[in-house]
Image (cartoon, helix red, strand yellow):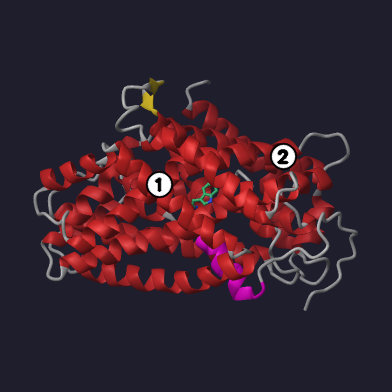
Amino acid sequence: MNKKSSVARQAPAPKRVGFTSGFGVLAATLGSAVGLGNIWKFPYLTGANGGAGFLLVYLLATLLVGLPVMIVEIALGREARANPISALQALAPRRQPWWLIGAAGMLAAFLILSFYSEVVAWVFAYVLKAMRGSILSSDPHVTEAAFSALIGDPLQSLLWQWGVLVFIGSILLMGVTRGIEALSKKLMPLLFLLLLLLCAVSLSLDRVVDGLAFLFKPDFSKMSAAVVLTAVGLAFFKLSVGMGTMLTYGSYFRDDQNIPVTTFCVMSADLCVSMLAGIAIFPAVFTFGFAPAAGPALVFITIPAVFSRIPMGQWLMVVFFVLAAVAATGAMLSMMEVPVVILHERFGLSRTSAILLTIVLLVFSGAACALSNSTLASFKLFGLNLFDLFDFVSSNIILPAGGIFIAVFVGWVWGRDKFRLALSNHGQLHNEKLVDVVFFLLRYVSPLLILIVMLKGLNLF
Ligand code: TRP
């Protein structure tokens, strides 16, 4: 099973834990990719940016930049069997500071987790509210008011966020194999099941055709450089790449795991979940007269109103938010694992202390986002409150920039031979052609494409 690698590894710990089965690797990686990105971000961004046209650009970005960077992050992680900082230090030539990508990734993890954990907090709160039946109303104004009341209440926002952090932290305490892997194996199949159930309901609605047309009929009138950048940012966000998450998970991959095939499966399944979420949401949005461009509040406002008009709606709504909670859990685990493993391996903290310290730091940085619709609502930078700012900066700047640096590192420093060796499982697989295509994309296409999209999208050029 575990072949001895011919390359001397500078692994810091002799018996480093990892994922144990092929399915476990797939489930955990998919668990990271599938998250609120599919169920919350993808629908509202697609809704706000014109539907199918946006979808098409997002698909291209996923294939041309997201997927190659994902493959490479996992390969780097598995070669080094270490956290992002140590891994890049071990793989780069001496005295070249590529480990800074890992350090930047750790900061990015805190930035993303700060707002992400707050959205998860809303989801958890909505599971409870759905069970109580307190938010079910056919009047959009009522559901909107209910959502505003939640996000505008500083105490509720903070408490739910702390609850989420403690919940995720306790799964991480169980470890990589018994926590992350074991749970993902159970949650991923459940997620698909719940999603299919919701799609079946949605496809029986009156205006299903309008909803599907919006999702599948391209209209490029809303296209702009900023929208293309948003699509690229979403592609990175969806695949969890650009900040070391996939590198960290790669370090837990089995030696005999076929990396290109696994990443392709994860990308396809992740895309499926996004599409299914779109199919579950947009017919309903049109049937009940909502605006598809409602923004981040879209699912929280439309879903309760939609389900109030369907038999057994209350319980279907519970299903929907449980589904979102399940998806969010795997993604949160993977993001928090980055600072945890860095603090553990680089700074010598025990895993338990590393988890506790990460939670404490997130309580502070997360409060900036939790309070951004109440106490700190008037505090704005560049016209955005802190929640929106953290979201914008991480997706549209940090992740794509991280992608550029990783691609340049592999394409121009680490080089083709080592890349080939890593992706062929040190000679076990014969996938040179495929690997060469990915390498070409990484060396010439991805970095340039991302750079142009960033400069244009941020209006710097
Ligand atoms: N991909 C996850 C989602 O769709 C979010 C996520 C997990 C993430 N790890 C990440 C995003 C690392 C950026 C970077 O919800």
Residue depicted at x 37% and y 26%: 384
Give residue 409's position: percent from left, percent from top: 75, 41
Local packing at callout 1 (Cα closer than 10 Å; few below 14, some 14-19, many 20+) is: many
Q: In terms of secondary structure, where does tag 1 sit?
A: helix
| Mark found first going from the N terminus, 1 or 2 | 1
Q: Which residue is mark 1?
A: 161
The amino acid at mark 1 is Gln
Give residue 141's position: percent from left, percent from top: 11, 43
Residue depicted at x 53% and y 63%: 30
Specify start and end residues of the magenta stretch as a single range: 20-31
Magenta portion: prevailing SS class: helix
Q: Is residue 224 something that shows in the picture?
A: no
Give residue 57's position: percent from left, percent from top: 44, 45
Q: Quadrant of residue 227?
A: top left
Q: Is residue 78 something that shows in the picture?
A: yes
Give the CA distance from mark 1 to mark 2.
37 Å
Marks 1 and 2: which is nearer the front? Answer: 1
Residue 147 is a magenta residue: no
| Vertical placement of residue 347 versus 184, above or below | above
Residue depicted at x 9% and y 54%: 138
The label shown at residue 408 is: 2
The amino acid at mark 2 is Val
Horizontal side, residue 296 vs residue 36: left or right: left
Give residue 358's position: percent from left, percent from top: 57, 45
| Vertical placement of residue 233 versus 179, above or below | above
Quadrant where the N terminus lies? bottom right
Horizontal side, residue 310 vs residue 445: left or right: left
Residue depicted at x 42% and y 63%: 272
